[in-house]
Amino acid sequence: MQTTLIQKYNIPGPRYTSYPTVPFWDKEGIALPDWKETVKRAFRESNDTEGVSLYIHLPFCENLCTFCACHKRITKRHSVEEPYLDTVLKEWNLYCDLLEERPKIKEIHLGGGTPTFFSAENLKRLIDGIFKRADRFEDFEFSYEGHPNHTSEKQLQTLYDLGSRRNSFGIQDYDPVVQKAINRIQSFEQVKKIHELSRKIGYTSISHDLVFGLPFQTESSIRGTIENTVKLMPDRIAYYSYAHVPWIKGVGQRGFDENDLPKDHEKRHLYELGKQMFFDAGYVEIGMDHFALPTDSLYKAMESKKLHRNFMGYTAGKTHLMIGLGMSSISDSWYAFAQNEKSVEDYQERVNKGLLPVFRGHLLTETDLIIRQHILNLMCHLETDWKLGLTEKQREAILDRLTEMFDDGLLEQVGSKLKVKEKGRMFVRNICMAFDLRLLENKPQTRIFSMTI
Ligand SMILES: C[S@@+](CC[C@H](N)C(=O)[O-])C[C@H]1O[C@@H](n2cnc3c(N)ncnc32)[C@H](O)[C@@H]1O
Ligand code: SF4
């Protein structure tokens, strides 16, 4: 039964880290003055009450992992660090000049690429530079992504001293055959060392990223990877579905072939196996593809319905304004999205001319804002409320598209609420697609999304 459902619903679809999703942003883009206006509006409305989030993209990695779909630049030349950080701080100053008072920072996340490519001294210079023009909001949170092979005790300590209590490490898979295929050789001993050092220093939330659906993964290889993972008991685990997107320019997925990937039902089995092993070890499932211990803030956020989803994935705290700094970063002012130039050179050139390096964006319409809230509700809380703003006609069209999912027992209607049943959890992306008016109005002619399962 489950296999039939998987075959039926495993279609290309968005991961809904935003609505509208990036390929459906307005073709005309967003004019810089409009983008700035929405930033100022969101800032006025929320700086005092919830603060501002910062996402800083640090794109460099020393080696290419051939499965990776992130925006990165491979280099061993560390001379790139300083000019890059100078540009990020210039960009930050451009935003600060725009705002009427000092921002109160609720959250900083350093993503990549590999933030721990940068030396401890440079990471300190970056964070100190940010706080020259800003203050910390109460319960300030600072997290970063680290590569276990390229993270030192000095970096862990420096970032901790700067206020970080949360880090995440890319693990992907411990099996030697899989590691060779994805060009990512890293031992359990190395991960254990860096994980235990983080604990010793005082980090209270450590996350491990695993990926299922990678080339040559089997039931027994995944079992081994998860057994190792739960030996260390990270507070959070991201268990990502491998996104095979070789058609995206600059991604460079290679070194294996589609025939080396587990088939649909095998891939889903790897997910189910992992999920059961996480449950047995005491983890709870959070939204889609995340697990956390009940002591972690992500679980608490889910329990208190404060879980939020943005371009960084799931987060425990929501802010209306998230400023993305660095090449390819996406900013969200709630009323609009804006993405930075995607190459390091174009990004630096724009900022050095004193311009915000936005190259595309989208101003949300009233309808976008309503649909966005429904999709967020479904992705974060697995339910939404029909009372939320749709017209009768829109609601009926959505219900019509959901008919088969009701018939398949994935959803239920309780009063004015639409609830995802346990059986429907793995199809939440498909459920959101029924609400996605932009996708429905402009069905893509070519493959632009990874598969939903
Ligand atoms: C920016 S990387 C992590 C930090 C660091 N560069 C590292 O590799 O350890 C963020 C995470 O995205 C996930 N990721 C990258 N490419 C992916 C893909 N094609 N499908 C699914 N997850 C992917 C990986 O789990 C990776 O750890
Ligand atoms: S997985 Fe991490 S280290 Fe590997 S290429 Fe991607 S961003 Fe770089």
Image (cartoon, helix red, strand yellow):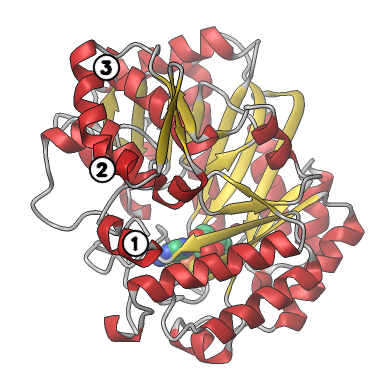
- Quick check: 185 above or below 389? below
Q: Is mark 3 within 8 Å of ligand 1?
A: no
Q: Residues within 10 Å of mark 1 (few under 14, many from 20)?
A: some
* The C terminus sits in image quarter: bottom left
Viewer-nearest residue: 6 or 343: 6
Label 3 or label 2, whichever comes before in sequence order: 3
Q: Residues within 10 Å of mark 2 (few under 14, many from 20)?
A: few
Q: CA distance from mark 1 to mark 3?
A: 31 Å
Q: Secondary structure at mark 1?
A: helix
Q: Residues within 10 Å of mark 3 (few under 14, many from 20)?
A: some
Q: CA distance from mark 3 to mark 2?
A: 25 Å
Q: Is residue 87 visible?
A: yes
Q: Position of residue 187 (x, y in %)?
A: 68, 84
Q: Nearer the viewer, mark 2 or mark 1?
A: 2
* The N terminus sits in image quarter: bottom left
Q: Which mark is residue 53?
A: none
Q: Which mark is residue 404?
A: 2
- Quick check: 295 above or below 135? below
Q: CA distance from mark 2 to mark 1?
A: 14 Å
Q: Position of residue 289 (x, y in %)?
A: 53, 54
- Quick check: 231 above or below 384? below
Q: Is residue 114 visible?
A: no
